[in-house]
Image (cartoon, helix red, strand yellow):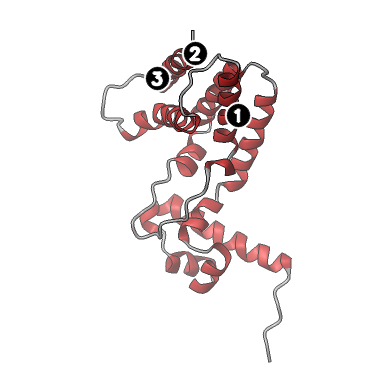
Amino acid sequence: MARPKASPEQRAQVRRSIQTAAADLYREQGLSGISARAVATKAGVSVGTIYSYFGDLTGLMQSLWTGRIAQLEDEFRALAAQHTDPLARIEALLRAYLEFGINQDVLYRNALMFVRPTMLETPDKQPLSDFAFPTLLRAALLEGQAAGAIVDEDVDTLVQVLWSGVHGALALPVNMDRLDLMETGSIAAQTISIFLRALRTQ
């Protein structure tokens, strides 16, 4: 006889159990402790169940932070709506991103400084338009270019340069902490100032 189909509540419980097991292993052992078998054993499910619910281990690990990142994206959208001037909007977005990285450093490191181990499959590429931060930057850049206030450079390149710059201001002091670098807040402030000067047409 066929096994009864799991209810939505039962599926949600299994999903949470897998995520809890993965989070516990990550906290206890780091990325080296994450494998499908280790997570399955800790969660009391089969390895196949993990792949059924999350696709792969990368999907599982990213799922641990998607809810909090979605909340952050809503905050970016609300912030952008407060600024009609495109340069002011870009500055506000960059500052908010940096403040998030500084004030929510554990979440930032886990979600946005996650380095995929070679044992995990390469994920499919997602377009930047799936995410609020680069999308809002792009819209502000286009608006500024149309008004003649922002340099006439390829907008998609500008988006990635801006994002790479603020990410680097957060990541470099963490990844290269053996070097005598500026304090993160100082690097961040200088990064934004330099970018804004470079973007302006005059």
Q: Which residue lies furthest to the bottom in this view?
A: 1
- The disc at residue 200 is 2
**Within 10 angstroms of label 3, few (less than 14), some, or many (20 or more) residues?**
some
Q: What residue type is labelled 3?
A: Ile
Is disc 1 placed on a helix, strand or loop? helix
Report the side of 193 relative to 146 (left or right).
left
- Identify the image quadrant of residue 191: top left
Viewer-side residue, 152 vs 61: 152
Q: Nearer the viewer, residue 84 or 176?
A: 84
Q: Residue furthest top?
A: 202
Earlier sequence position, callout 1 versus callout 2: 1
Above or below: residue 92 compared with residue 65: above
Disc 1/disc 2 C-alpha distance (Å): 16 Å
Which mark is drawn over residue 139? 1
Mark 3, secondary structure of its residue: helix
Q: Which residue is drawn at 55% across and 14% down?
A: 149
